[in-house]
Image (cartoon, rainbow, N blue to C red):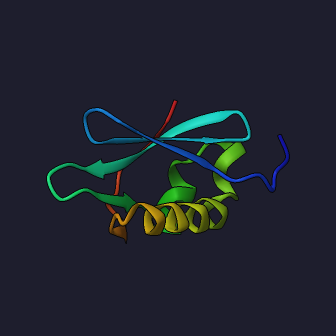
Amino acid sequence: MTATSKVQFQPKWKEELVCTMDGMSFIIEQSTGVITVYFPTQTRWESLAPEWARQQWERVRADLSTWCQQQKIPFVIEDHARVSFG
């Protein structure tokens, strides 16, 4: 898989959106009820992300924004959004 491949997104039970990028996975916050995806600010992302993901904020943000538009899901960038790298 190349670094320019699209980031893949798969909703998961319990308010999680599983993201796969370059063979690695992480989880972004997705609320239920009125489904909304919450993505951390670039500063927060860089403070939480492991080395392999640290410089990928813009790539993930762009692909996630496109995915949310296609799914008709609101997309919110906020400092307190949860993201977990496993």
Total residue callouts: 0
Rendered location of residue 40, percent (x, y): 43, 61
Q: Is residue 53 above or below residue 45?
A: above
Residue 84 sits in quarter: top left
Q: What residue appears at the point 52 percent right and 29 percent down from the top-left corner?
A: 86
Rendered location of residue 60, percent (x, y): 60, 59
* Closest to the observer, 56 or 10: 10
* Closest to the observer, 8 or 49: 8
* Closest to the observer, 86 or 28: 28
Is residue 42 something one can see in this rendering? yes
Q: What residue appears at the point 50 percent right and 68 percent down from the top-left corner?
A: 65
Q: Residue furthest right?
A: 2
Residue 13 sits in quarter: top left
Q: Is residue 44 above or below residue 51?
A: below
Q: Residue furthest left?
A: 33
**Left-right relation of 20 to 29:** right
**Left-right relation of 74 to 50:** left
Q: What residue appears at the point 74 percent right and 40 percent down from the top-left corner?
A: 22
Rendered location of residue 37, percent (x, y): 35, 58
Q: What residue appears at the point 34 percent right and 49 percent down from the top-left corner?
A: 29
Is residue 78 something one can see in this rendering? no
Rendered location of residue 45, percent (x, y): 52, 57
Q: Is residue 82 above or below residue 36?
A: above
User: In the rendered image, which quarter contains the N terminus?
Assistant: top right
